[in-house]
Image (cartoon, helix red, strand yellow):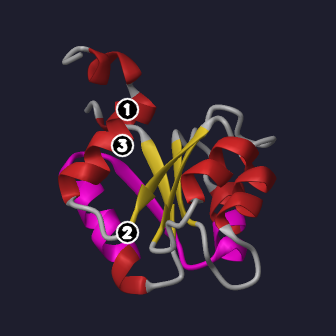
Amino acid sequence: MGTEKQPTILVVDDIASNRTLVKEILKINDYHVLEAKDSDEAKQVSESYQGPISLLIADLVMPRTNGMELARFLRPKRPEMKVLYISGYNADVNVQIEVWDAEADFLPKPFSPNGLLQKVCDLLDPSMSDKDK
């Protein structure tokens, strides 16, 4: 009982160890996690998953289709979905994301488990993160 209330997060990263780390951090904190190794697999996962996907965590730099292109493809089908981009390439990325995708956030790699969880909380429940301000 109660598991239906947990937000579902789709994690997309072409590096398996990164994907596994993010998935484990989220699962330990009671999120429902879907995963994909690339944009093509993410599209299939999104199509076959019946429930809402609250958050897409996507690597910005992946073979073929990057994280931003993936978000642009998925968003019309999943308007409820927020987006968190992750990347080890963080030169001017924040500025680029603000210009291209005002409804998304960015977390540079490497990040701590707490850093990831704080970003996820900020995106999924802004009222919770505003409490400490």
Reading the image, the residue beneath label 3 is 119
Q: Secondary structure at mark 1?
A: helix
In percent of width and height, residue 14 lies at 53, 82
Figure check: 107 above or below 117: below
At label 1, the amino acid type is Asp
Question: Compared with residue 36, is residue 92 higher up or lower down, i.e. above or below?
Answer: above
Residue designated by label 2: 109
Question: Is disc 2 surrounded by few (<14), some (14 to 19) or many (20+) residues within 10 Å?
Answer: some
Q: Position of residue 21 (x, y in %)?
A: 28, 72
**For residue 123, side relative to residue 20 (left or right):** right
**In the picture, which quadrant includes the N terminus?**
top left
Residue carrying label 1: 122
Q: Real-space Cα distance between discs 3 and 2? A: 13 Å
Horizontal and vertical percent for residue 126?
A: 39, 22
Rendering coords of residue 109 (x, y %): 37, 69
- Tell me the chief SS of the magenta region: helix
Q: Are marks 3 and 1 in contact (CB under 8 Å)?
A: yes
